[in-house]
Every structure is written in C-alpha cells, then in structure tokens.
Image: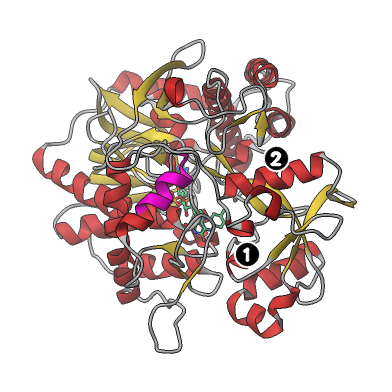
Amino acid sequence: MEKHNHDIIIIGAGLAGLRAAVAAAEVNNKLDIAVVSKHHPLRSHSVCAQGGTGAAMREKDSFDLHAYDTVKGADFLADQDAVEFFVRQAPQEIVLTEHWGCPWSRTAEGKIDQRAFGGHSFPRACFAADMTGFHEMHAIYGKAISYGNVRFYDEWFVTSLMVEGNTAVGLTAIEMKSGEMSAMRAKSIIMATGGHERIYEFTTFSHSTTGDGMAMAYRAGAPLEDMEFVQFHPTGLVPSGVLITEGARGEGGYLLNANGERFMKKYAPEKMELAPRDVVSRAEQTEMLEGRGLEGPYGPYIALDLRHLGEEKINERLPLIRDVAIKLGGVDPTKEAIPIRPAAHYSMGGIKANIKTETPIAGLYAAGECSCISVHGANRLGTNSTADCLVFGAVAGQEATKHALSISLRELSQDKLAAEERRLAEISRKEGTEKPPVIRDELRLIMNEKAWIYRRGDQLQSALKEIRELRKRFKNVRVEDKGKSFNTGFLSVLQLDFMLELAEVTVASALPRTESRGAHSRLDYPKRDDQNWLKHTLAYYAKDGPRLEYAPVTITKWQPVARTY
Ligand SMILES: Cc1cc2nc3c(=O)[nH]c(=O)nc-3n(C[C@H](O)[C@H](O)[C@H](O)COP(=O)(O)OP(=O)(O)OC[C@H]3O[C@@H](n4cnc5c(N)ncnc54)[C@H](O)[C@@H]3O)c2cc1C
C-alpha cells in the first residue's frame, strides 16, 4: 500500500476546498498542502452555481440587514454569531476573487453589479452573468495552482477517514487510474465534499453529489447537524431537474399556474416570486396538488415566464438559462414560458462545525455545503452558499494551518488500514443478486415520495423502514466490473453506500421534529414550535441507526418572530 504524508489534506476541490487551499498556502509557503478530489476540480458542482454570491456592498445596505434576512430566511434556526461573522467577511471575498480574475458583471459606472434574490431585502447578489460559480471556480483554481506547495490529487476517491483517540490522523483513498488504495497522513484534514442531494430523484445537483464526506465523518464519530432540512428550489427544469436560476425571477420573471395567475400573490403578497425558496416551493406544490398545475408529458408543472423581459435582457443577463431551456427543455424563453417544478437543491445540514470550522473531532475541519456551521438554519437564502464556501473555506484554511504548525504527524493504525482494504476488496468482489442502480433508484423514489416538500409522520416512518430494508438488500449487491482502472461501477457502489447512510439520517432526523420550520414542513404539525423545537438536531453514528441529541441555537440580536413575506 502506498503512503503519502502532508501537513494539510483538503478533501474536495469545489469552491470551499479551493478557497481553503489558497488561504492555507497564503499563511505559510512551507506547509505541504494536498487537495484530493474524485474528479478534476473544475468538474466540482460549484462550477454550476448560476445566479450570484451574496454580500452587502452598497451604502444603503448593511451587515445587520443581510444578517437579519439570513436569520429570518433560516426560520430562526441559524446560529446568529456565525451569521454576523459571515456577512462581515463576505464583501472582502468578492473583492479578493475580483483580484484573482473573476469577471463580475458591472453597472454602467463600472461598479460590481448586484441583483435581487429571494428573501434578501436589498439587491446583493454579485454575479458573472448566470455563470457565477464557473467564473469563481476558474479564478480560484488559477490562484491555487500558482503556489508551489499545493499538490492536487485529481481523480482520487476518498473512502474513509482515520481517527485515533478523537483526533483525525489521515484517510484512505483509491487512485482511480490504478484502482489501488493508498493511505494518507495529515496533521489537519478539511472536509469540503459538498452536499448529498443525489439521495433524491428530482434534483438540480450533479451526479457526483452523493454526500461522501458527510457519511465518512459521521462514521468516524462526528455528529451530523440538522439533516432534516433539505432545500427544494422552486425552479428545476422539467424533466431533467437542471436548475433555472432564481436570478431569472431576480431579473423580473413570473411564476404562473394553469389559469395564467401569478399565484404567489396568495402566498407572499409583498415579496411575490422573490419570497424565500421554502415559501415559493410550497406554494408551487400546493398549486399542483390542488389541480392548478399545467399538465405535460412528465406530470404537472408550473410556468416560469420571462418573455416580458425581452430578448436583449435575457441574452445579456441570463444567456445560460436560455441555452439550457432550449437544449434541455425544448422551449426558447424569449418566446415561451419555461416548464419548472421544485427540485432538491441544498443540504442545510451537515458535519457539525463551529465558527472556526472546527468539528468535534480534533484536527478535522469542515467547510462549504458538507458542513453545518450553522449559517443557513432551516432554509438557506439564495447566493448565501457560494458566499459561505468562500468565507468559511478561507477560515478552514487558516485554522487548519495553525493546527498543523502546532503538532506532528501521527501513525495510522495498521489494523484499521488492513480492515479498510479488506472491506473495499469484499465490496469489489460482490457477486450478489441485487443491481446497485435498482437500489439507488428505489432510494431516490422513496425520498421523493415520502421525504419531499410536505412531510407526514406516517410517511417518514414508512420511508425509514424502506431505507433500512434497502440497506439490507445492499449487502447482497453485485459489482459487475471486476477491473481495476476507472472502475466507476465499483465507485458508484461506494457512493450508494454513503447515500443510503445519509438518507437514513435525513429521515431519522425529520421524524421526531414535530413542527414545521423552514424547509421541513409537516402536514401533521403545520406550526413552528419554538418552545419545543428551537434547537439543532445532532445525529451520531450508532450500529442500529442514528442516535439523536439536541443543541441550543445561538441567538445574539434577533428573537424569533412570525415569518411573513
Ligand atoms: C445548479 C446549481 C446552481 C447553484 N447556484 C448557486 C448560486 O447562484 N449561488 C449560491 O450561493 N449557491 C448556488 N448553488 C449552491 C452552491 O453552488 C453549492 O452549495 C456550493 O458550490 C457547494 O460547494 P462545495 O465546495 O461545498 O462543494 P462542491 O462544489 O460540490 O465540491 C465537492 C468536492 O468534493 C469532492 N469529493 C466529494 N466526495 C469525494 C470523495 N469521496 N473523494 C474525493 N473527493 C470527493 C468532489 O470531487 C468535489 O471537488 C447552486 C447549486 C447548483 C446545483
């Protein structure tokens, strides 16, 4: 088995991971930093971010306003100290990425332009047309590879985290080209592996977004926080689920039902289409459930109408959306409305981490979508995720550096390495009767049908039972390809294993939360219940399914009030 040693290993090369690499390299040019990613960094989901990155950058805007919008959007479950820190750091990240080459769209006077987004009381989404993530990623990747001390392991698949005495000491990874497992030691490890949306069937996320890092940290003893809160984005293109950015509504797009009504006036008379995503998704779902959706070959849908914006504006501000709608939806938005419906879009939950991105495991940091710090609480506002990746990616890089400079490398347990090698070999040899894609598709349907926008206790209970049955069936899977090099069939089985684990945690966390808050909307408990449920869920790994604990929410300035828009 090959062995590699580094001071810091960052798992994941999306916005959070790359930002962490730059921050660490910036602090100390002698540190040996590695970035491990299961695909090339520029294929991370972050390149898909479309609409913008939120930061209070105008005179009439303020940190308090951005913070309050975020806290209210979060249905008061966000930790307010983290939110206050986050909004203060965001503007400088916009300026830094600008210096590194991100081509932010401009106003006529040449300032960085900002557009409106759902739940924000001020236009604060900085954007690079509708390809914000693509440009941010290229700028930061360019910066990261300019350092001599950042080594990239592209197309290396991390399989487990090694923890000794509650300290992270290393990891195991498969080099996809050779198919061989290596051991890696590090003084600090940063998890930046993104979300777990692929546990759902209808999602805006890349096929690679399978929650690996959350599952690995969980199995190694780190708690997963608030996993019941999954965001549904109001505008997934029918039938693929590919995102139509909220920027389309930020630029003035309307949502229409089958009667041609802008139905949002019933649900959010003030904010209309620019209410937060949980509110708009529920409104769309209700319209469709009550028979006011449009009917198409793929079931009911809602119309997103951009025609009144005119061809020139659509081409300038939303070129990608037009292209996507034509190629994947078969409609030209300058001439027809776009067929959309809500799609799974963000994991508010993740590896529990504090404002310094420290997890309860020493030497393990978490940033970006795999983490829960918690800035987004029960519902994230649009543009706050890329901003969160930049802000807390930088913090993770700095904190991991401090830690790495203060300790030495530790030995990995030979027994545990041998056990991981055996586990992987056993899976790769599996000759059972179950086909992995069948189990995967069944899992996604269960999540879509029973843990979707509206939830009910009996449905969650039945989802949990069915997921546990799938986990039993998973033991009897068959891995067809017995080859070593780029065995994507085998790797997708490892991803399926992670997804089954996280689906169980998501549903097990949702079941006892007998209230409706943010994205977790219970038909059997339609009201928010601050007396009993103004608290974070913590799920700890246990052999027979997650063990749940609860932790208080940090409130600095803003007491919970009724949430209207
Ligand atoms: C279509 C779309 C549009 C969006 N638009 C916006 C927007 O406009 N504004 C906004 O704020 N947010 C937006 N979001 C959300 C935002 O893009 C994501 O939350 C954010 O980019 C996540 O970044 P990340 O760095 O945490 O992870 P990702 O970019 O998902 O990267 C994860 C990394 O982890 C690596 N990895 C995972 N598992 C393993 C493993 N087992 N071994 C090795 N490596 C591994 C991957 O290779 C990858 O490099 C959008 C999301 C989507 C899907």
Q: Residues within 10 Å of mark 1 (few under 14, many from 20)?
A: many
Would residue 1 be seen by someone viewing this image from the given angle? no
Ranked by sequence position, the earlier of labels 2 and 1 is: 2
Magenta segment, principal secondary structure? Answer: helix
Seen from the viewer's position, the closer of residues 504 and 522 is 522
Per the image, the residue denoted by label 1 is: 249
Circle 2: element type:
loop
Would residue 170 be seen by someone viewing this image from the given angle? yes
Amino acid tagged 2: Glu
The residue shown at (74%, 21%) is 433
The residue shown at (63%, 23%) is 430
The residue shown at (70%, 67%) is 324
Q: Position of residue 292 (x, y in %)?
A: 84, 48
Per the image, the residue denoted by label 2 is: 201
Q: Position of residue 334 (x, y in %)?
A: 76, 77
Q: Which stretch did the figure color magenta? A: 67-75
Q: Is residue 95 above or below residue 497?
A: below
Amino acid tagged 1: Arg
Seen from the viewer's position, the closer of residues 432 and 68 is 68
